Image (cartoon, helix red, strand yellow):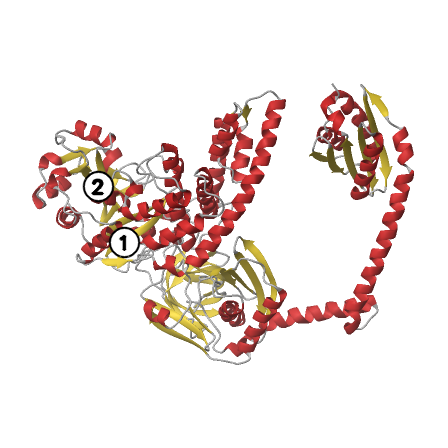
Amino acid sequence: MKFMGANELRESFISFFESKEHLRMESFPLVPKNDNSLLLINAGMAPLKPYFTGIQKPPKTRVTTCQKCIRTGDIENVGKTSRHGTFFEMLGNFSFGDYFKNEIIPWSWEYVTEVLKLPKDKLYVTIYLEDDEAYEIWTTKTDIDPNRIFRLGKDDNFWEVGTVGPCGPCTEIHFDRGVDVAPVTNVDDFVAASDADRIVEFWNLVFIQFDKQEDGSYAPLKNKNIDTGMGLERIATIMQGVDNIFEIDTVKNILNKVSSLSGVEYGKDANSDVSLRIVTDHVKAVTMLISDGVQPSNEGRGYVLRRLLRRAARHGRLLGIKGLFLKDVVDAVVENYGGNYPVLVENKDYITKIITLEEERFNETIDGGMNILNGYIKELEEAKSTVLSGEKAFKLYDTYGFPLELTEEILEEKGMTVDHEEFKKEMEAQRERARSARGETSYMGADENPINKVKADVETEFTGYTSTEGVGKVVVLATDEAFVDELTEGNKGYILTDKTPFYAEMGGQIGDTGMITAANGTAYVYNTKKNVGGKTVHYVEVKTGSIKNGEEVTLTVDKVRRSSVCKNHTATHMLQAALKEVVGSHVHQAGSFVDNERLRFDFTHFQAMTAEEIQKVEDLVNDKIMEVATVETKLMTIEEAKESGATALFDEKYGDKVRVVAAGEFSKELCGGTHVSNVGEIGLFKIVSETGVAAGIRRIEALTGRAAIKYMEEKQRLLKEACAALKCTEKDVLKKISTQSSELKEKDKEIAELKSKLTSGALDDILNSAREINGVKAIAYGLEGVDGNALRDLADKIRSKMNSGVVVLVSKLGDKVNLVTMATKDVLDKGIHCGKIIKEVATVVGGGGGGRPDMAQAGGKKPENIPQSIEVAFQTIENLVK
């Protein structure tokens, strides 16, 4: 058995199965496509589910991959155990109705004993209790010692998900890490050695041969499938003679970088080792997530990313690292994984920028979280309690990104704890909200709508690049409940045809609308989309007569609407090119939406664009439109497309042939959408907004053609109306507004001065209204027409003149109420707390608020209750004074 690096192992596995006529497929992105059942890809077979279910035709019946995966269910164990990690790679080979047990069992033995050269006296195999077929193949087609084969039950060697669907037995290959130990000879000893982590499973071969029925029975599948999974990190620990996934070469190199940055040596302290491993694992995971297009946010995938990133930053602090450091760890990730995932190298600057922005935000947030936690601690001390509610701990965790373990550490110093049960309930409620957001789906990610169960052999030829009208044959009709043979007048449903000019929503472009006409009926197509298997589906409402399965129909796209969509789509390409030229080459598409009314383009940029930059981009696009260049489309290989300089989405997976759309020499992109034939057709391009939508992501919305002209005409109309109202010409409108603004400011100043004089005049009356309450001088007074700022200034003056005491002022301003409370420092020790006073007073006037012990403000909606609020103020002060 020789040492093999992780990168060498990956290539070894893929090459072996290529020699067995498997198609090598690159890893799919971590973000699932058309699969609401998964937040992130968490298993090697997950992106291949449409091939297993038969709703999509695989590129070949034999496939091999090394799939990037993310699992966060055991995030609390990461760094504490030898095998938990959030990001991992899963080696796999798959058969879609091709070969079965007779082939994969001998191949697997060949790979582990002849390629990896693992000692046969260190290997064991488990099979399902009832799988005599697998046992016979193992014992007749390999030279494994039959005494090293153990039969296990359903919990160990049978794979099924949910209550129904494809499933089957599996066989696993195990390695004995024990040194100078006798081989195990019975199943009980085998299980005990596995539980003790002496014997480790490293390759699982799943035989998908049954379809579990609702009555619990297992019906044989017509087409049997193979799904195997070997964790790259786990086999690397075996091949490198280490016991921990953090000690394999690629991961250890990253950990060494963290150790160097922190000055903390690995292996010297258990707590420091945990932090070193967490930073290593989490930065690797967030680098991969960002490289596949995930952005930090407070929900879904973005929340997973943000949580991992903040945990890494937090443990960096625990290691004593000062300032921003995560970007330096990214360098080590790219160095060790960039060879297999070149997207990391291509987008390294972008990845590090996003991570740095998020780390900066967290550094600010964690300080804010400390202030909030200190407030909670003070409340507990005042209440003589030692348990922080789970709700508050979760709020710190969820809203402020404050790790639970940090909250616990700080509370422990004060002899306090967290209500863990309540925290768990809050966490579970949050997970339930996340699950609900993904939607209810059945096994393999296909929801129950029949349209998502259309078989892979149903294909639709798209003819819409060259025409908006065509003839096709109806091949599938369905409602929400079932496949049908006919849709009649008034029915809503779905139609699939063998040919269609209708573009299905994809790549940010909205689906076409139009009409389908049959011999005895017409149907309005109100949307066109792809189902989970990638089939083009017409969403229809039958207007007259009926549409029957198998009949020939005429399909007519709404040409005017399509034309507007095309203008906006081509303009989106030109916008991206212009942004790269004006703003910088770091610009990447982060999302887009194109319909017949406008275009929306999200892109990576780390600050708001200036007005000058926006104008430059708009002018550049319009200049290029006026060059009236031809828009050309060509089919190329992905390598040819990249060599030609075409822009691709870095989180997208492309097929062997790609469609390259070139708008003259200005823009060249990989795109499957529909476009104008000449950029001059766009007419006019107008940016209407530029905003931020997430950290490092900006959004531009723009109009083209007739919509842009209407927008400009509306602006012109508004300008004329403004001129009429201001009684000036268009060229004098800014001067007129400036003059009136100056006049208004002067009047506001005069009004403020008059109000100040009026309130100052009432100063003596207010001071004379003071009461003595248990040795504390107290004022509670009602006023009219005093705004919040003036009321606060007045309260400050009164507090200064009182020398000692508390003042509560309540003012009616229109139908609103302003309140302010201030106290001198000396009365705080006597029990006065302005925040508590104002809370009670505000309640009376239909408001709420709070604040510090020495000052608080609030508002209300019931000015008629001001007299009662004054009495409540005095009563509250009396209750507080000790």
485 vs 581: above or below: above
Q: Name the residue under label 2.
A: 241
Q: Where is residue 417 in the image (x, y as percent from the top left)?
A: 51, 25
Q: What element carries label 2?
A: loop
Cα distance in 3D space between marks 2 and 1: 25 Å
Residue 145 lies in what quarter of the image? top left
Q: Indicate the quadrant containing the C terminus: top left, top right, bottom left or bottom right.
A: top right
Q: Indicate the quadrant containing the N terminus: top left, top right, bottom left or bottom right.
A: top left
Q: What residue type is labelled 1?
A: Thr
Q: Residue furthest front?
A: 263
Q: Position of residue 277 (x, y in %)?
A: 36, 40
Q: Name the residue under label 1.
A: 65
303 vs 224, left or right, is right
Q: What residue type is labelled 2?
A: Gly
Residue 652 lies in what quarter of the image? bottom left
400 vs 720, left or right, is left
- Asked whether 556 or 123 is in front, the reply is 123
Q: Is mark 1 on a helix, strand or loop?
A: strand
